[in-house]
Image (tube, rainbow, N blue to C red):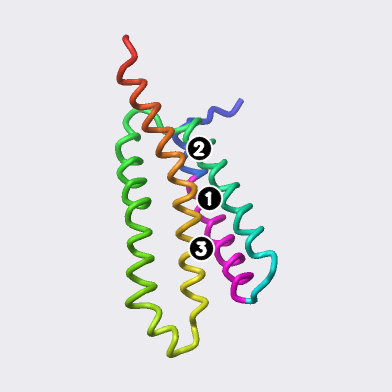
């Protein structure tokens, strides 16, 4: 019988989802670039799947010593990514891409990072609740 540690499963789920987020972000941004009518549906389904996977990852993983590093990373990504997207899309990246005709790159970056946040946020909320209950639990 294979002995799987929940921490290792959590790490693999996170790594796999980053690849899924990159692939899905590229695909959905391509749909948006081509004005495909299925763009909104595809975006909604990918966000739904990423939220569900984040809930599953939060429920089945991250306990003990790994809570603090995960939550620091989650807060950094949930707060830092939107600020990064606003700064890059408004000031740095858009003028350069408009000159060179590469406006779709911003859509790709935005979609990938939003899918990562959609995965990390529910996992972080569940882990905070689990950590709070484990602190208050009498031993």
Distance (Cα) linking label 3 and label 1: 14 Å
Q: From the viewer's perspective, is residue 103 above or below residue 43? A: below
Residue 78 on image: x %, y %: 37, 51
Asked if the residues shown at circle 1 and circle 2 are in contact, with their CB atoms under 8 angstroms apart, the answer is: yes
Tell me the number on the disc at residue 111. Answer: 3
Q: Circle 2 is placed at which residue position? A: 57
Per the rendered image, the range of residues in magenta is 14-33
Q: Earlier in the sequence, mark 3 or mark 2?
A: 2
Left or right of 48, for residue 87: left
Asked if the residues shown at circle 3 and circle 2 are in contact, with their CB atoms under 8 angstroms apart, the answer is: no
Name which residue lies at 46% across and 73% down. Answer: 106
Name which residue lies at 50% across and 70% down. Answer: 107
Distance (Cα) linking label 1 and label 2: 10 Å
Q: Earlier in the sequence, mark 1 or mark 2?
A: 1
Q: Could you say which is closer to the camera, residue 130 or residue 1? A: 130
- Element under label 2? helix
Residue 136 on image: x %, y %: 31, 17
Name which residue lies at 55% across and 48% down. Answer: 50
Q: Earlier in the sequence, mark 3 or mark 1?
A: 1
- Element under label 3? helix
Q: Which quarter of the rendering shows the N terminus?
A: top right
Secondary structure predominantly adopted by residues drawn in magenta: helix
Residue 68 on image: x %, y %: 30, 36
Q: Circle 1 is placed at which residue position? A: 17
- Element under label 1? helix
């Amino acid at each position: 019988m294979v002995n799987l540690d929940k921490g290792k499963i959590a790490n693999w789920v996170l790594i796999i989802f980053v690849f899924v987020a990159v692939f899905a972000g590229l695909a959905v941004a391509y749909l948006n670039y081509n004005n495909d009518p299925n763009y909104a549906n595809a975006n909604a389904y990918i966000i739904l799947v990423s939220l569900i996977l984040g809930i599953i990852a939060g429920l089945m993983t991250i306990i003990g010593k790994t809570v603090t590093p995960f939550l620091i990373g989650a807060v950094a990504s949930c707060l830092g990514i939107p600020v990064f997207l606003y700064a890059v899309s408004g000031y740095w990246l858009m003028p350069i891409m408009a000159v060179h005709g590469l406006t779709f790159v911003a859509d790709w970056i935005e979609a990938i990072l939003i899918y990562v946040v959609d995965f990390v946020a529910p996992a972080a909320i569940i882990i905070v609740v689990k950590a709070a209950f484990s602190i208050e639990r009498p031993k």
